[in-house]
Image (spheres, rainbow, N blue to C red):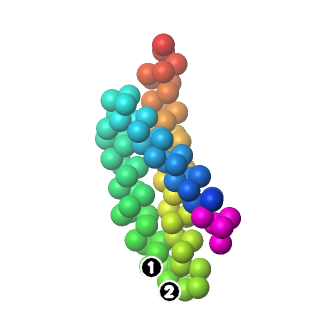
Amino acid sequence: MILYICNTVAVGLFGIILSAAFQSLGHSRDSLVISLLRYIVLLLPIALLLVHLWPEQAFLCFLLTELGACLVALPMYRSVYQSKIAVL
């Protein structure tokens, strides 16, 4: 259980850092997309699916949601990096 919590926090912090980076670089729409993915678009369906398929492991929905949001955020960050940061 402790390992699950540590992994979720680590992945969650990475998502929060990416979201803050988008906002600070002037890409607030990307930050909004990541936040909506983390809290609504991915969390609710994954939680419902896990409750129906594997009720005793429903707590994994948070880790899966954070991983999914990070997988979406990485290509977005790469695009922002190439257009804003690499130019500097």
Residue kind at label 1, given as amino acid type: Leu
Q: Is residue 20 visible?
A: yes
What is the quadrant of residue 5 in the picture? Answer: bottom right
Which secondary structure class fits the magenta region best? helix
Q: Is residue 68 visible?
A: no
Check if mark 1's residue and mark 2's residue have beta carbons within 8 Å.
yes
- The span picked out in magenta is 1-5
> Nearest the camera: 75 or 25?
25
In this rendering, is residue 8 above or below 58?
above
Q: Quick check: 8 left or right of 39?
A: right
Residue kind at label 2, given as amino acid type: His
- Residue 23 in percent (x, y) is at 35, 35
Residue at numbered disc 2? 52
Find the distance from the CA under tag 1 to the CA under tag 2.
6 Å
Residue at 49% over, 36% down: 77
What is the quadrant of residue 41 in the picture? Answer: bottom left
Specify the label residue 82 is tagged with.
Answer: none
- Residue 38 in percent (x, y) is at 42, 58
Residue at numbered disc 1? 48
> Nearest the camera: 39 or 72?
39
- Residue 70 in percent (x, y) is at 52, 50
Graded by Cα atoms within 10 Å as few (under 14), some (14 to 19) or many (20 or more), the crowding at tag 2 reads few
Q: Is residue 19 magenta?
A: no
In this rendering, is residue 3 above or below 82?
below
